[in-house]
Amino acid sequence: EEACSSGYISTVTVTGYQDLTSQGSPKPRKRDAQHSAAAKALLAMQKLLPTPLESRSNPKNLVLQWLAKVAKKPVGTEDYAYEVAAVEEGFQAELVLKCLGEDQRYRGVPEKTKKLAERSAAQIALEYLQGCS
């Protein structure tokens, strides 16, 4: 905090995911200045992070939720794998589900990035798995 002619100004610095510094508005009380800076930092962080809706609608997350429900246990990295290969169009991923007896494989469509290719494979798997349940 620093004193100014109209009271106090506070700054919040968040390190880790992405370094972020937010300065609050001048406030007559030190505590109010701290709250102002914290509120601005939270708003800035919300813009950097996926919204809960994006998180829930991400096919990769939905597949893991489905697997946990069917397997009736927490799903770990030993239960699934994404195998990504470079192809002419970019990348193509195959999702391998290892926790349902014999390995089940779902190949996505080629995409420009590895991340999108994995999502594509997860979407294909999800459509198939939801159709079977």
Image (spheres, helix red, strand yellow):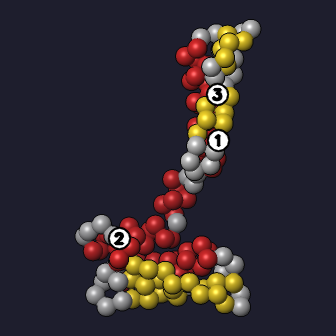
Three-letter code, disc 3:
Thr
Query: On the image, which quarter does residue 31 sit in?
Result: top right
Amino acid, disc 1 = Leu
Whether 88 is drawn above or below 95: the answer is below
Q: Earlier in the sequence, mark 3 or mark 1?
A: 3
Position of the C terminus by quadrant: bottom left
**Labelled disc at residue 42:** none
Q: Residues within 10 Å of mark 1 (few under 14, many from 20)?
A: few
Coordinates of residue 51 in the picture (x, y in percent):
56, 52
Q: Residue at x 61, y 35 (%)?
A: 13
**How far is disc 3 from disc 1 in space, using C-alphas?**
10 Å
Is 104 positioned to the left or the right of 82 in the image? left
Secondary element at tag 1 = strand
SS type, badge 3: strand
Identify the residue at image location x=39%, y=82%.
Answer: 97
Q: How far from the left and from the top, in percent, is residue 124?
A: 51, 82
Position of 40 relative to 2 (above/below): below
The residue under label 3 is 11
- Residue 76 shows which numbered tag? 2
The residue at 68%/28% (across/down) is 23
Q: Identify the residue at the far right of this view.
A: 5
**Residue 117, image x and y in percent?**
60, 79
| Left/right of residue 16 with respect to residue 112 in the rendered view | left
Distance between the Cα atoms at labels 1 and 2?
32 Å
The quadrant holding residue 36 is top right
91 left or right of 129?
right
Q: Using a 10 Å C-alpha cutoff, classify the residue at mark 3 as few (fewer than 14 neighbours), some (14 to 19) or many (20 or more).
A: some
Q: Earlier in the sequence, mark 1 or mark 2?
A: 1
